[in-house]
């Protein structure tokens, strides 16, 4: 994944997934974690994207975990956080540590699905990526993939805050506008 390097060659992290691997190396299942932190990506800055944002990831590992469990957790989260009328869709996608993988979208909070500049005229806003943990990941951390299954998800905290609070531009979080920031 292309990202930013400093002049001394240090790499700025593009995701918080490394925390999941470190936890799995230290602890045996069952386990569930939430990790978060600042990440950097070479995204073009627009109303919904920034080169820097805060990411939160979740991981659940246990016997008998299924993809349907992931869908249930994400449906429950979206409806509790955004309201019971929230429409959700799952789209197939590729992420390197999960298979199958999906991107999860909710109906645009500005246009309610009709299409606007915030949702790039699609009617939907991506809120997170998710999937079943790839068995190779379990092998790498010493878990038996025949016994243990799991799912993981990751989301941008600013994007979720935008949706929840009807904020139409992610750049407001970084403009140092005290009037905007005081409302939180």
Image (spheres, helix red, strand yellow):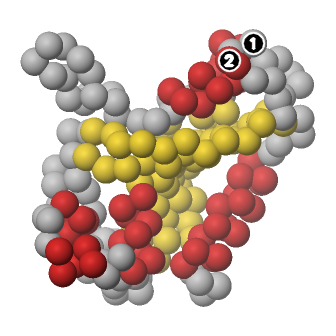
Residue shown at 89%/40% (left/top)?
A: 64
Mark 1 Cα-neighbour bin, 10 Å: few <14, some 14–19, many ≥20: few
Q: Position of residue 94 (x, y in %)?
A: 49, 38
Question: Which quarter of the figure has residue 174?
Answer: bottom left
How many labels were placed on the picture? 2
Query: As rendered, which of 9 and 89 lies closer to the eye?
Result: 9
Q: Where is the N terminus found, in terms of image quarters?
A: top left
Circle 2 is placed at which residue position? Answer: 25
What SS does tag 1 mark? loop
Q: Is residue 72 above or below residue 10?
A: below
Q: Residue at x 35, y 43 (%)?
A: 38
Residue 103 lies, with reference to residue 101, above or below; the image says below
Q: What percent of the width, then of the height, locates residue 170?
A: 25, 65
Q: Nearer the viewer, mark 1 or mark 2?
A: 2
**Cβ atoms under marks 1 and 2 closer than 8 Å:** yes
Q: Quadrant of the C terminus?
A: bottom left
Asked whether, in this view, residue 112 is left or right of residue 99, the answer is left
Residue carrying label 1: 142
Dividing the picture into quarters, in which one does residue 81 lie?
A: bottom right
Q: CA distance from mark 1 to mark 2?
A: 7 Å
Q: Which mark is residue 90?
A: none
Image point 82% across, 17% down: which residue? Answer: 144
């Amino acid at each position: 994944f292309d990202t930013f390097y400093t002049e001394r060659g240090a790499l700025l992290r593009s995701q918080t997934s490394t925390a999941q691997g470190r936890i799995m190396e230290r602890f045996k299942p069952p386990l569930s974690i939430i990790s978060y932190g600042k990440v950097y990506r070479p995204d073009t800055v627009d109303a919904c994207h920034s080169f820097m944002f805060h990411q939160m990831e979740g991981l659940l590992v246990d016997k008998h975990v299924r993809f349907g469990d992931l869908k249930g957790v994400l449906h429950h989260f979206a409806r509790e956080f955004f309201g019971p009328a929230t429409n959700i869709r799952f789209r197939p996608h590729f992420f390197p540590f999960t298979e199958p993988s999906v991107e999860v979208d909710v109906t645009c909070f500005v246009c309610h699905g009709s299409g606007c500049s915030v949702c790039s005229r699609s009617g939907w806003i991506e809120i997170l990526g998710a999937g079943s943990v790839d068995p190779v990941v379990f092998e790498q951390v010493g878990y038996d993939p025949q016994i243990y299954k799991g799912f993981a998800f990751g989301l941008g905290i600013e994007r979720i805050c935008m949706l929840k609070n009807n904020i139409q531009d992610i750049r407001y979080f970084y403009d140092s506008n005290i009037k905007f920031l005081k409302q939180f």
